[in-house]
Image (cartoon, rainbow, N blue to C red):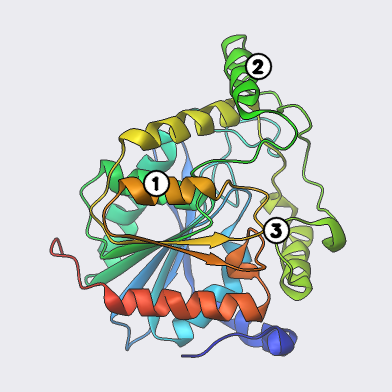
Amino acid sequence: MFYSSEAVLSDNQAAIHEFYNNTLIKGYLNTPAGQLFYAYAKPKQANTAIVISSGRIEALDKYQELLWELYNNNFAVFIVDHQGQGRSYRLLANKHKGYVKDFSDYRRDLQLFNQQIVDSHWQGKKILLGHSMGGAIAFDYLAHYDNNFSGVFLSAPMFDIHTKNTPKPLAKLIANLATLLGFSKSYALGQRDYMPDDFAINCLTSSQTRYTSSRQIYQQQPLLQLGGVTYGWLHAAFRFITSLNSLAIATPVFIASAELDEVVDNRAHHLLANKQKNVTVKTFNGAKHELLFERDEIRQPLLADFYAFCESVGESSDQ
């Protein structure tokens, strides 16, 4: 397999940009609430498609390196910007506010994307790759819809969240009360418009190269920027997390946990695995939250496990 490397990432930027600008096919998908921005590419020799459900704040532009890498390894790639972020529609006047009416809206969008875009352009084996909030959306989608995915690989899925210095029960109560009192569209306490942290204090990745690259993308394209969460988003997230106890999927699952994660609570990965069938959990030592954007010593073993997982799961019987 070909693995992209931090050491030559700068040298490869021209090839990555060429792929993004001229190989990726981009478009907008109409939904009842607004348009979703998406992209896809299909190598001639591809026999497996990777459908990516990205994390909160993330735009598909951020995934250029990974999309290029997967394409060079003969995987078809499909990715969509979730509502409220990237180039997809946003519901609030302040475009920086992270907001969703209900978490189920995300899974309905993913279902529409899979039906109208992915299945229109690809007939064959498919793997769902979800990161963080996108991992939660992927699991929620698989639990509620008949689908034709052979497996789902989850990078630091958001099955529970860290609430920093606020006890979790109190955070849930505050989000619930704020929503009931009409403050669902207001920033949660401590949240603000987009303002990137310096690398030295960031909690997302230990790869300065990839962190800098991501920040440059958002700096150059201000419309991609997204700030903190609203009480409405937080309330919707907590409701989804509570619902996990009643959700189950038959699709093979691989959960990659980041040892040093300060965004999601890794304990929830093991709790879910204990209640589900056909789930593998692996912790990546020394890793921060964004496993797919970590330094090479973490990211390459992660992708090696991902490729092995793709190989290990058979084509869905629903194909």
Residue sitting at 13 percent across and 64 percent down? 317
User: Quadrant of the image for the C terminus?
Assistant: bottom left
SS for dot 3: loop
Residue sitting at 71 percent across and 50 percent down? 225
Q: Is residue 31 left or right of residue 55?
A: left
Q: Residue furthest left?
A: 317
Give the residue pinned by disc 2.
183
Q: Quadrant of residue 245?
A: top left
Residue sitting at 30 percent across and 49 percent down? 276
Q: Residue furthest top?
A: 181
- Marks 3, 1: nearer the viewer: 1
Q: Is residue 237 left or right of residue 29?
A: right
The residue under label 3 is which amino acid type? Leu
Give the residue pinned by disc 3.
204
Mark 2–mark 3 Cα distance, whole angstroms, equals 28 Å
Q: Quadrant of residue 175?
A: top right
Residue sitting at 43 percent across and 69 percent down? 40
Give the residue pinned by disc 1.
272
SS for dot 1: helix
The residue under label 2 is which amino acid type? Phe
Q: Residue 128 location in percent, x, y?
A: 37, 62
Q: Residue 281 location in percent, x, y?
A: 43, 61
Any part of residue 22 in sight: no
Q: Is residue 183 above or below residue 222?
A: above
Q: Residue 261 location in percent, x, y?
A: 64, 55
Q: Residue 163 location in percent, x, y?
A: 67, 35
The earlier-in-sequence mark between 3 and 1 is: 3
SS for dot 2: loop
The earlier-in-sequence mark between 2 and 1 is: 2
Mark 2–mark 1 Cα distance, whole angstroms, equals 31 Å
The residue under label 1 is which amino acid type? Leu
